[in-house]
Amino acid sequence: MRVLLIRTGPSGDLPELYSLLLLNSSSAIVAVGTILKQFGVDVDYWHIPIMLGIPRTQEKYNERLGKFRMLIKGSYYDWIGFSCISCDEYLNILDFARICKEEKPDTMTVMGGYHATMVARNIMRDSKYIDVVVRGDFEPICEKFIKGIKNHEQLKYVPNLILRHNGKIIETQKMLIKYNINTLPSYDFSIVEKYVSSLGTLDIEGSRGCKFKCEYCSEAVVRGGHFWSVKKPEKLIEGMKTYSSFMDEHFSYRRFFFVDPLFGVDKNWLNDFCNRLIESNLNLVWSCEMRLDRLNSDEILLMRKAGCTFIFHGFESGSPRMLRLMRKTNTPEKYLKKALEIVNTARKHDLYIFGSYMLGYPGETMNSLQETRDFIEKQIDAGGEYFYPSLVFFMPYPGTSTYFELDKFSKRYGTKVLIDNLWKYSKTCLHRPIIQPSKELDVGSLVEFHSNLHQWAKSRTYNERMARTIGAPTNIDFNADLIELRKTGCLPPAGSVA
Ligand code: B12
Ligand code: SF4
């Protein structure tokens, strides 16, 4: 059996996003490809932004689709799988899936990933170019899925699918399959090998799932907040040793990014992992996403000694009221105090912190935005050139609790959904506000606030050493690119919504 896996990249035409994508190895693709190979499937992978470039105009985008059509025409695969991690990728994927179907009508098209899982029914209803959506993790159903591809009648018995069958849309049994990630095969990075000169970092997993159920997070829905499985430190380090050899063949450094939704949540595990990694003398660097408010100074130091160079934390807001509303913490004052201390500690230990902030959550007002700005200023004072705030507009991901509670917010705060399910119509839905947070805060003011704060923070903190540490290209002028993109019409003008 021959399978083609495809990453189209987000369609948002945002250089920042593309640059991230160009530099990661896409753990979902590697995980899916690895398990398929284990069952004897011949796997090919097309990383579209690297293969066909990054289109900055509609014309270039169409050119890229034309090239893709020629490639598909000359290929043969039993099925083609698309990974759809976020809302912004969806419409792009449909363009590519349409071409696959036009050129190879009998080849099955399959979609999986976070966003695909959250909106699986909509996808099957709205798009005739996708034949199957896989909901949730692929490894536990892989063997049955392969059998089902060989004999379509069997697909009905594979759990967690939505598929077309004799002209009807069928949902197979939906279940949360619990398993131990230590039983999964180690990532087979040969799948991404042909793109490796463009990759700066290898994405790996220390754990999968999350026990928390944050209101706004897709993870809490995709794996139900009931699944969390962590790799044994010794097994993880053994894997990192093998991956290091792979890196040595291609790079002059060894750099990993842990894609765990919440890395090191178990403190004993974190200590054990770091100590073993130090002892192993592997001489590598790594980074991860975690909750810094749960760490103390000794743990930060230990992580740094073990090679950690930057940590990503979703601080989300500097307003105690908003933090409560988001259910990020019950003790916001304590949380914010800790958020300042830890940034300062990280600076002392030569560790970079990326702090993400969600602007425009339901109930947000100009006052709470100002609290966030004041807090970020304090964090920049504390973290200096080691702290970078990343500012995103709040997006009610379809399927999350917040998404279903928008009516409640509307009554309470005057929250208004400006465009429902924008991901169905827009290629840039994650990078502009799609709700008016409250009756006191209009979208124009929110966008202006975001833009000013972003410019200001970037001029204060972003620096070349930081860019090199996170593996971002230093030669991209994000602002100039954004202005160019707006001129071409790829991006909405600043301040607009539709
Ligand atoms: C690591 C990560 C990243 C990395 C790497 C992403 C990448 N391109 O690989 C970086 C930092 C680059 C990133 C960026 C972004 N991310 Co991100 N990211 C994650 C994170 C933490 C883990 C994803 C992961 O790799 N998991 C490990 C793999 C093995 O698991 P998996 O992806 O679920 O794959 C399994 C199944 O889904 C399935 N599967 C997946 N694909 C396919 C394909 C086929 C054919 C099949 C059969 C099965 C299948 O099988 C896999 C193995 O079991 C998640 C989750 C989280 N809780 O925070 C967010 C998450 C996916 N990201 C999210 C977002 C919003 C973004 C950004 C848009 C952020 C931003 N505002 O700029 C960007 C854009 C990324 C993009 N579109 O490419 C959201 C998506 C929400 C949504 N519903 O749209 C998530 C869910 C976080 C959240 N807050 O809820 N991200
Ligand atoms: S936001 Fe983080 S802690 Fe909360 S459910 Fe999602 S992954 Fe878990």
Image: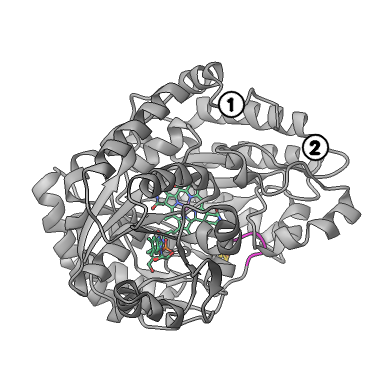
Does label 1 or label 2 sit earlier along the sequence?
A: 2
Q: Relative to 483, say whether 385 is above or below.
A: below
Q: Which mark is residue 118?
A: none
Q: Residue shown at 64%/36% (left/top)?
A: 432
Q: Residue shown at 17%/72% (left/top)?
A: 40
At which x and y percent is residue 392? 60, 42
User: Which part of the image, by quadrant, shows the C terminus?
Assistant: top right
Q: Amino acid at mark 1?
A: Trp
Q: Nearer the viewer, residue 74 or 118?
A: 74
Q: Residue shown at 27%/47% (left/top)?
A: 46
Secondary element under disc 2, as helix, strand or loop, is: helix
At which x and y percent is residue 369? 74, 40
Q: Main secondary structure of the magenta part?
A: loop
Q: Residue furthest right?
A: 411
Q: Amino acid at mark 2?
A: Met
Q: Measure the C-alpha gap from mark 1 to mark 2.
A: 18 Å
What residue sits right under mark 2 in the picture?
Answer: 366
For mark 2, does the 10 Å Cα neighbourhood hold few (<14), some (14 to 19), or many (20 or more) residues?
Answer: some
Q: Residue shown at 58%/68% (left/top)?
A: 220
Residue 272 relative to residue 424: left or right: left
Magenta segment boundaries in residue numbering = 214-218
User: Which part of the image, by quadrant, shows the N terminus?
Assistant: bottom left
Q: Relative to 387, say whether 4 is above or below.
A: below
At which x and y percent is residue 273? 30, 71
Q: Can the viewer see residue 439 in this picture?
A: yes
Quarter-wise, where is residue 142 in the image?
Answer: bottom left
What residue sits right under mark 1 in the picture?
Answer: 456
At which x and y percent is residue 184? 28, 76
Queried on whether the Cβ of the residue with tag 1 lies below 8 angstroms from ligand 1, the answer reads no
